[in-house]
C-alpha cells in the first residue's frame, strides 16, 4: 500500500528518496570536504567589456602580443616565464619561452594594445588563469609579422639580398597558413631563391613578401641558403 502511494504522489516519493540518501550519508561517518567539492562552476566567458570599450579581435591581440615579444626578444630567458601587463596593471598574457606556450586573456580593449609591457617572472608563475585562451608564441609572432603595423620590419635587410631556403615547415595550426604561404614554401623547398626572384615568381607586392618571409623567419622556417 505504501509503495502504491509513492507511485501516485511525487512529493512523497521525493521525500522518501531524501530520507534514504540522508541515512546513507550518515552511515558514511565524517567526510573531509575538499575545496573542489565546494567550488562554484566557473562563470561563462564574457562576450563584451564591462566599460563598453571596443574589444580587440583575436588577430589584433595576438599580433600586438607577438610584436611585444619580437621587440624584447633579446631578453626572453628560457629560465623564466613572462607576463604581459596592460596599461591599467591587469594581466593580459602569460608566456613560457622554454615551451613556447602562450595564454592570452580573451577580452582586451583596443586602446590597451599600445601600452602593454613585458615583465619577467619566476618559471613557477607560468600558470595562466583558467579562462585565458591557449595558443603558442609562434602563432603570435606569425600574426605579428603578417598583420602588425611594423611586421614587415621584422625581416632583416640582408634577407632581401642573399639566397634563401626553407629550413622546416611551420609548427602552426593549418588555419593560420594561407595558400600563398604554401606556394612560397614550395618554391623555397625546391631550391634557393632570392627576394627578387620570389617577387617575380609569386606576384606579391614588396611589402607583402617581406611580411610573409618575416613570418616564416620568426617561426624558424627560413634560413640563408
Image: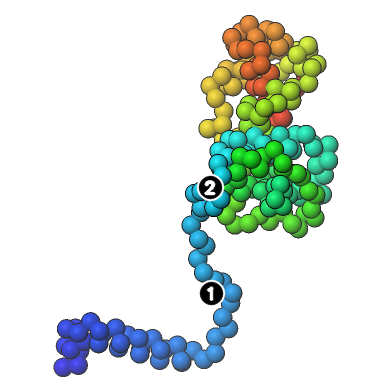
Residue shown at the point (56%, 80%) measured from the top left: 33
Secondary structure at numbered mark 1: helix
Tell me residue 14's x, y (percent). Answer: 29, 83
For the residues bearing labels 1 and 2, Cβ distance under 8 angstroms: no
Q: Which residue lies under the disc numbered 1?
A: 37
Which of 153 and 79 lies nearest the eye of the viewer? Answer: 153
For the point 55% across and 41% down, the residue is 54
Q: Which residue is mark 2?
A: 52
Q: Residues within 10 Å of mark 1 (few under 14, many from 20)?
A: few
Q: Specify whether 39 is left or right of 146.
A: left
Say left or right for 132 vs 80: left
- Where residue 115 sits in the image (x, y, percent)? 72, 41
Q: Earlier in the sequence, mark 1 or mark 2?
A: 1
Quadrant hosting residue 5: bottom left
Against 188, residue 178 (above or below) is below
Q: Residue at x 56, y 19 (%)?
A: 180
76 over 166 or under it: above or below: below
Q: Whole-percent x and y of residue 30? A: 54, 90
Q: Quadrant location of the N terminus?
A: bottom left
- Let me know if residue 134 appears in the view: no
Amino acid at each position: 500500500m505504501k509503495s502504491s502511494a509513492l507511485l501516485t504522489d511525487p512529493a512523497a516519493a521525493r521525500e522518501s528518496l531524501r530520507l534514504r540518501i540522508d541515512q546513507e550519508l550518515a552511515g558514511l561517518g565524517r567526510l573531509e570536504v575538499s575545496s573542489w567539492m565546494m567550488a562554484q562552476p566557473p562563470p561563462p566567458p564574457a562576450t563584451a567589456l564591462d566599460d563598453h570599450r571596443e574589444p580587440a579581435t583575436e588577430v589584433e591581440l595576438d599580433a600586438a602580443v607577438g610584436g611585444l615579444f619580437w621587440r624584447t626578444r633579446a631578453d626572453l630567458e628560457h629560465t623564466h616565464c613572462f607576463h604581459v601587463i596592460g596599461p591599467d596593471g591587469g594581466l593580459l598574457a602569460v608566456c613560457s619561452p622554454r615551451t613556447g606556450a602562450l595564454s592570452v586573456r580573451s577580452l582586451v580593449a583596443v586602446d590597451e594594445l599600445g601600452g602593454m609591457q613585458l615583465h619577467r617572472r619566476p618559471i613557477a608563475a607560468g600558470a595562466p588563469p583558467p579562462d585565458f585562451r591557449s595558443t603558442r608564441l609562434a602563432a603570435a609572432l606569425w600574426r605579428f609579422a603578417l598583420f602588425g603595423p611594423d611586421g614587415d620590419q621584422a625581416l632583416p635587410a640582408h634577407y632581401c639580398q642573399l639566397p634563401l631556403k626553407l629550413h622546416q615547415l611551420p609548427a602552426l595550426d593549418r588555419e593560420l597558413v594561407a595558400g600563398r604561404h604554401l606556394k612560397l614554401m614550395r618554391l623555397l623547398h625546391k631550391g634557393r631563391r632570392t627576394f627578387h626572384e620570389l617577387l617575380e615568381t609569386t606576384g606579391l607586392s614588396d611589402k607583402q613578401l617581406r611580411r610573409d618571409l618575416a613570418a616564416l623567419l620568426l617561426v624558424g622556417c627560413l634560413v640563408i641558403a
